[in-house]
């Protein structure tokens, strides 16, 4: 474990402490922008995944095994006192059906974003999912080397992936998100596109906050087509949007990563 690791990695609200991160990050958070905890009914998440993300006839982990494995994974994380506060923050389990990704942008455009749209509009019929991303995503996205996201892609080639999405990197720049992940144990990966989409298929109300404003959520494990450009999900009112923008290595109070 990196020497940067302190006694408590996460604060009492589940935010990852920036420790000695050198890239742009807000040391303290006013918690003005935050997510509310969605319902984590494993059977519901499994049913949504089966309905909106699995290919027709594709066999995926059954609901009971999904719940057992997800609970075991979380229990293993938070049993360590250094990481116990992670459970005090927002987290959603997800099930990612086995897949081989040849072109990341094409996969998002043709499979994963439509699945998010369908799941979101089915669960929240009064609101819309809108992609504002200009042009095709094909050939525009690559995995950031420091993100560890390639491990998820390797695992997904051989079978379903079960994990937890924790949007705990609140008020971090993208370089800071990639810097902090190197200080965490190997089973922490920065969230990219297909895992974030799987989490939103299972928990489409993650961005629905009626008592305030949720953050913008960067796909921090992915590089865009130009340096300093990234892709993200963001609430617009109560609608959910997908878009790209320049981040330029800066930090904002309403930015988050997972």
Image (spheres, rainbow, N blue to C red):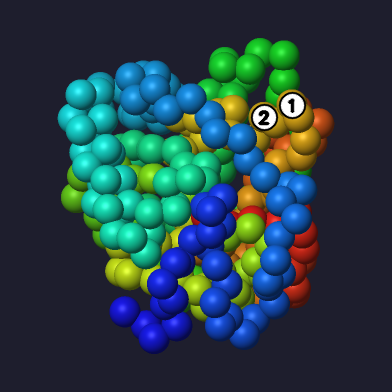
Measured from the top left, where is residue 130 in percent x and y? 72, 33
Measured from the top left, where is residue 143 in percent x and y? 47, 67
Residue 167 seen in this snapshot: no
**Residue for point 30% across, 69% down:** 186
- Left/right placement of residue 22 relative to residue 9 reads right
Name the residue that disc number 2 marks.
208
Kindly check if marks 1 and 2 are in contact, taking CB atoms under 8 A apart as contact. Answer: yes
Q: Closest to the observer: 86 or 73?
A: 86
Measured from the top left, where is residue 168 in percent x and y? 54, 55
SS label for mark 1: loop
Counting every numbered tag in the picture gives: 2
Report the disc number at residue 47: none
SS label for mark 2: loop
Measured from the top left, where is residue 18 in percent x and y? 57, 72
**Residue for point 59% across, 28% down:** 205
**Residue for point 61% across, 35% down:** 36
């Amino acid at each position: 474990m990196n020497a940067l690791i302190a006694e408590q990695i996460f604060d009492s609200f589940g935010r990852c402490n920036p420790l000695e991160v050198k890239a742009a990050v807000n040391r303290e958070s006013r918690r003005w922008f935050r997510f509310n905890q969605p319902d984590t009914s494993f059977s519901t998440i499994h049913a949504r995944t089966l309905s909106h993300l699995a290919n027709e006839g594709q066999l995926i982990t059954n609901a009971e095994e999904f719940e057992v494995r997800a609970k075991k994974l979380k229990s293993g994380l938070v049993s360590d006192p250094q990481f116990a506060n992670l459970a005090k923050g927002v987290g959603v389990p997800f099930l990612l059906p086995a897949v081989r990704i040849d072109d990341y942008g094409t996969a998002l455009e043709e499979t994963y974003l439509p699945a998010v749209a369908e799941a979101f509009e089915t669960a929240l019929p009064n609101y819309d999912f809108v992609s504002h991303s200009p042009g095709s995503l094909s050939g525009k996205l690559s995995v950031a080397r420091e993100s560890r996201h390639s491990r998820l892609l390797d695992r997904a080639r051989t079978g379903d992936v079960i994990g937890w999405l924790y949007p705990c990197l609140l008020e971090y720049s993208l370089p800071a998100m990639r810097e902090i992940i190197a200080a965490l144990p190997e089973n922490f990966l920065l969230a990219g596109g297909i895992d974030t989409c799987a989490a939103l298929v299972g928990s489409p109300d993650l961005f629905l906050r009626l008592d305030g404003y949720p953050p913008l959520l960067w796909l921090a494990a992915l590089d865009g087509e130009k340096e300093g450009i990234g892709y993200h999900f963001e609430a617009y009112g109560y609608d959910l949007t997908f878009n790209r923008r320049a981040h330029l290595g800066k930090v904002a109070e309403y930015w988050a990563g997972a």
